[in-house]
Image (cartoon, rainbow, N blue to C red):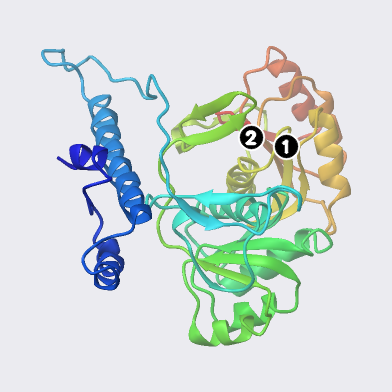
Amino acid sequence: MIRAAAKNFRDVAVVTDPADYARIAAELDDGNGVLPASTHWYLAQRAFALTAAYDRAINRKLQCIPSPGARDSVSVEKLPNALDINIPKKLELRYGENPHQSAALYASNGGGLGSAKKLHGKDLSFNNLVDLDAAWQLIQEFKNPAAAIIKHTNPCGCAEQESAAEAFRRALECDPVSAFGSVLAFNCKLDTEAAEEISALFVEAIVAPGYSREALEILTKKRDLRLLEIGVEPTGPAIKSISGGFLVQSQDDLSWVDSQLTIATERSPSEDEMKALLFGWKVVKHVKSNAIVYVRGGQTVGVGAGQMSRVDAARIGASKAVLSLENTVASSDAFFPFADGVDEIAGHGVTAIIQPGGSKRDQEVIDAANKHGLAMVLTGIRHFRH
């Protein structure tokens, strides 16, 4: 009926959204019971959008249901045969990656950063949202109060501590120079102490589950600082556009359990080393590949991101370190193809390494770790991030 009415839009006004009631009532009063032709056309567009969304919803659901009579063991495809994207525009952005590019945020109410509420600050840009999303995804890895400092989608500091303020202080120690103009994410409500610490640094935006009244009073003194509040986890597949199409994959939410970890070296990590290794493993998952991260005690110390060579990532991560690298541990997002990466890391005072393993030269890599007296833990899971 809706579709039929919309087809006859010149003579029929089909109203499908209660949000339009007030407008229609006012126009009927102004026009003595007659609506303008432009409103008829607007309502027809709204009607066809509604019926199209209804059909899409049915199609998506049907693709998730096995065919009638199928055995229970028959699985449904994890990804659809056809990608159907119909998401409403939520926000016009200041600009895209560069000022000469236009941009907008399209988001449903499915959760994640697209559902965040902006509490304060100037309009968001494309880059702000990309960085905030990277920060928010990283911070979800931790249960205790944690802070992430992101610059160009890579962490330049991350820490998990007893409070938001202490987590921010420790995260900032990693690379205070790169933190200038960054975005921040917290997995806990920001209080007065945290807000006072943050206010001393120039940052573009902050996302957190909430802010105390006192924290808002402090942070809103910075006129341009964007403050976002978020409370729902991201859902659905990860979609990236490429020239001429889209790449779609499921979220990288695979987690390890202790039983999957393998001690590959003659020396086992100490309790403190293992705790640091597992913290580093959570962080390196969110660093662009090739990635090497140096950490100690719930705090990043050096981050080597986005390098074509893993040994270069190790060198750069060490060169970025402001704090001492002595007695740190290192995490690698993928296996070491050669022993030179281990040699490089060992030369900076590292005592243990965590990495996926799986290289045909694993034994050479393990032998190098033994030569340097390092403990090495294999996870069996790779976390490339392109």
Q: Is residue 336 above or below residue 255?
A: above
Q: CA distance from mark 1 to mark 2?
A: 9 Å
Q: Is residue 332 above or below residue 357?
A: below
**Left or right: where 196 falls relative to 47:** right
Residue 353 appears in view: yes
Q: SS at mark 1?
A: loop
Residue named by callout 1: 291
**Left or right: where 159 falls relative to 180:** left
Mark 2, Cα crowd under 10 Å, few <14 / some 14-19 / many 20+, is some
Q: Residue 127, image x and y in percent?
A: 68, 52
Q: Which mark is residue 346?
A: none
Q: Nearer the viewer, residue 271 or 346?
A: 346
Mark 1, Cα crowd under 10 Å, few <14 / some 14-19 / many 20+, is many
Q: Nearer the viewer, residue 244 or 150?
A: 244
Residue named by callout 2: 385
Residue pictured at 30% horizontal, 46% vertical: 44
Q: Residue 244, image x and y in percent?
A: 61, 23
Residue pictured at 28% horizontal, 72% vertical: 26
Residue 345 appears in view: no
Give the quadrant of the N terminus.
Answer: top left
Name the kind of residue labelled 2 in the image: Arg
Contact, CB < 8 Å: mark 1 with mark 2? yes
Which circle's residue, 1 or 2, is located before the other in the chain? 1
Q: Nearer the viewer, mark 1 or mark 2?
A: 2
Q: Residue 252, image x and y in percent?
A: 50, 35
Name the kind of residue labelled 1 in the image: Ala
Q: Residue 182, image x and y in percent?
A: 72, 61
